[in-house]
Image (cartoon, helix red, strand yellow):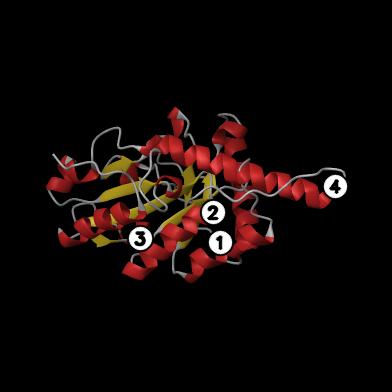
Amino acid sequence: MTALPPFSEKSYAELITTFVQRGYQVTPYTDLCIGQPHLILRHDIDMSLEAAVRIGKLEADHGWKSYYFIMVRSFLYNILTSESQAFIRQLTDFGHQIGLHFDPHLYGEDWDLLDAAATREVDLLSDIIGQPINFISFHRPLESLLGSPRKLAGLPHTYQPKFFQEISYCSDSRGDWHYGHPLDLPAVQQGRAIQLLTHPIWWEGEARSATDRLNTFVKNHMNEFKSILRDNCSIYQFNDVSKADS
């Protein structure tokens, strides 16, 4: 059984390098061949675009191209700010693909309502980044969407059978491999295709626990929030403190 090193940028690079050394080819969704050693690198950006850029640069330095799925209606980042848009431009400059990370819980389970909402979000994200959106992933996917072959907003999604059931699938949900290390999956042992979902927030920087990462994330963003409030309302006084180590 493969050892489970703490998540870090170094261990992420080592993981993907091991796949490549075993004959895997980093492949876009559109070129997937189920029986081949194809590796789809997918990142859902639930919390931090800044963390995504760090992992995106690491991948670009190794010549790996990934998919970064970005939320339009996030409570943790705002894609309309100049800072967020600069982060997104960096990801596209690295050669990565941008997709929509769509939260169906905001709209309910009616398919027509989901389809209309996804269409609006796709159009907005496409307008912001200046290029088409070709794929959708789901944030906290509804049970009815897992394995559904139907397109949403006329686009394929990452939980269609070809990408979720007919090939291997592994995620680092909540900062851990809850179903075992991806290199130990039977499909990977047999050299068949896999979709690997990782969240950059768990991997950026040095090795730390998921809890420590979240605590640092909260501290950093609370400082930013206080600074913004002070800059926009003179009656609020706040002494800057250094950001927690990332």
| Residue sitting at the far right | 235
Categorize mark 1 by other alpha carbons within 10 Å: few (<14), some (14-19), many (20+). Answer: many
Task: Residue type at mark 1: give it.
Answer: Ile
Q: Are marks 1 and 3 in contact (CB under 8 Å)?
A: no
Query: Residue at label 2?
Result: 49
Q: CA distance from mark 1 to mark 3?
A: 19 Å
Q: Are marks 4 and 3 in contact (CB under 8 Å)?
A: no
Q: Nearer the viewer, mark 4 or mark 3?
A: 4
Q: Are marks 3 and 2 in contact (CB under 8 Å)?
A: no
Query: Residue at label 1?
Result: 88
Query: Residue at label 4?
Result: 233
In the rendered image, residue 4, in percent from the top left (x then y), is placed at 23, 41
> Which of the marked residues, 1 or 3, is nearer the chain's N terminus?
3
> Judging from the image, what secondary structure is the residue with disc 1 in?
helix
Q: Are marks 1 and 4 in contact (CB under 8 Å)?
A: no
Task: Residue type at mark 2: give it.
Answer: Leu
Q: Residue at x 80, y 52 (%)?
A: 231
> Which of the marked residues, 4 or 2, is nearer the chain's N terminus?
2
